[in-house]
Image (cartoon, rainbow, N blue to C red):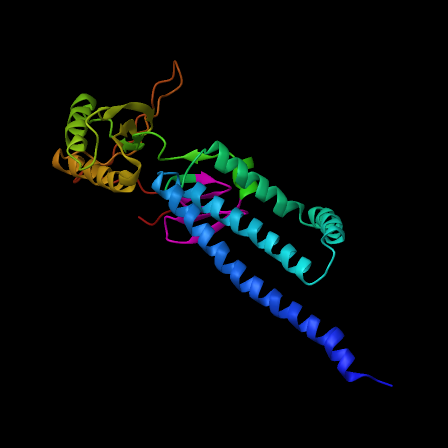
Amino acid sequence: MFDLDKLVNDYLVPFGLKILMAVVIWIVGGIVINVVARLVRGAMTRRAIDPTLVRYTESTLRIALRIALIISILSVCGIETTSFAALLAAAGVAIGAAWSGLLSNFASGIFLIVLRPFKTGDMISAGGVTGVVDEIGLFVTTMTTADNLRVYVGNTKVFSDNITVFDANAFRRVDLTAQLAHTVDVQDAVARLKTRVAQIPNVMPTPAVDVAILEFNPSGPVLAVRPYCHNRDYWQVYFDTNRAIAEVGGTAHWPVPAPRQIFMPPPGEMPKAMPAAPATGTASAPPLPNSPA
C-alpha cells in the first residue's frame, strides 16, 4: 500500500530542506563574494596598485569563489564532490581542447598583467588596432580608437603581435615635409620655418624643431619639418604645423613648385633653328604650279 506520509517525511521533506539550504547558501555566498571582492579591490586601490591589475585580480577572485560556492552547494545537496571533481577535470580537458583559443587568451592576459608592456590609459598599436587601452580583461583587451569606436582584441593577438606604446616616452616627433621651388632661398626658408613652427602651442622647446633638406626632386628641394610634442598633442601640432608651412610660404611669396625640364641636344649636334615667320608687308610666296594667275 502506498504510504504518502513516509514519502513526504523520508524523501520530499529532506529534499526540500536541501533545496532551501542550497538557495540560502547561494544567496549568502553571493553576498560574501561581493563583499570580499570589494574589500580586495579597496585594499589594492589604497595601495595605489595599477587599475588594470586591480580589475584582473577582482575578476579572477570572483570566478574562483563562485566555483568554490557551487562545489559547496553540491556537497550540501548530497552530491559526492570527489566524483564531481573527477568529472570536472575530465570536462576541463574536453573544454580545454575545444576552447584552446580562449585558454590561450587567458594565458596571454596573465602575461600582459605580469610583464606590463602597457597599462590602462596608454595609447598603443597592437593586433592591428590603434587606440587608448580601457581595460585588460581575462580574455580580451578593450580599446577606444581615435574615431571613438570600442574595439575588443583577443589577448593572444595583442601579446603575439608587435606592440607600439605611444605614451612610453615623454615626447614624440611629428614628421612633415615642405616642397620648395628651385628659385627659393633654402637657408632663408629653413630659418623662417624654424621660427614659425617653434611658436606653435605645445611644441617642445627641447628638442628643438628640426628643419633640413630631406631630398631633391624635379620640382625643387624638399624640407623635412619635424617638431616634437607630447603624444596627447600630436594631431594638434600636426595640423598646426601644416598651417604654419602654408602661412610662411604665402608671407614670403614663394612660387608654386613645378617640375622644370631642359632639353639638351646630343653632343656635336647644333639645335635646329625654328623657321622665322614672314614679316608683315613683305612679298607673298610664289604661286604654286598650275595655280591660276
Q: In this view, does 67 lie to the left or right of 121?
A: right
Q: Position of residue 43 (x, y in %)?
A: 39, 43
Identity of the residue furthest to the right in this view = 1
User: Is residue 151 inside the magenta stretch?
Assistant: yes
Tell me how many marks there are.
0
Quadrant for the N terminus in the image: bottom right
Q: Give the range drawn in magenta.
A: 125-154
Does residue 185 appear to the left or right of 19 in the view shown?
left
149 or 288: nearer the viewer: 149
State whether residue 240 is above or below residue 98. above
Picture residue at 21% right of the left edge, 30% below the top:
204
Drawn side of residue 4 relative to residue 29, left or right: right
Outermost top residue: 268
Residue at x 72%, y 61% (from the top left corner): 78
Front-lying residue, 40 or 160: 40
Between 152 and 1, the residue placed more toward the observer is 1
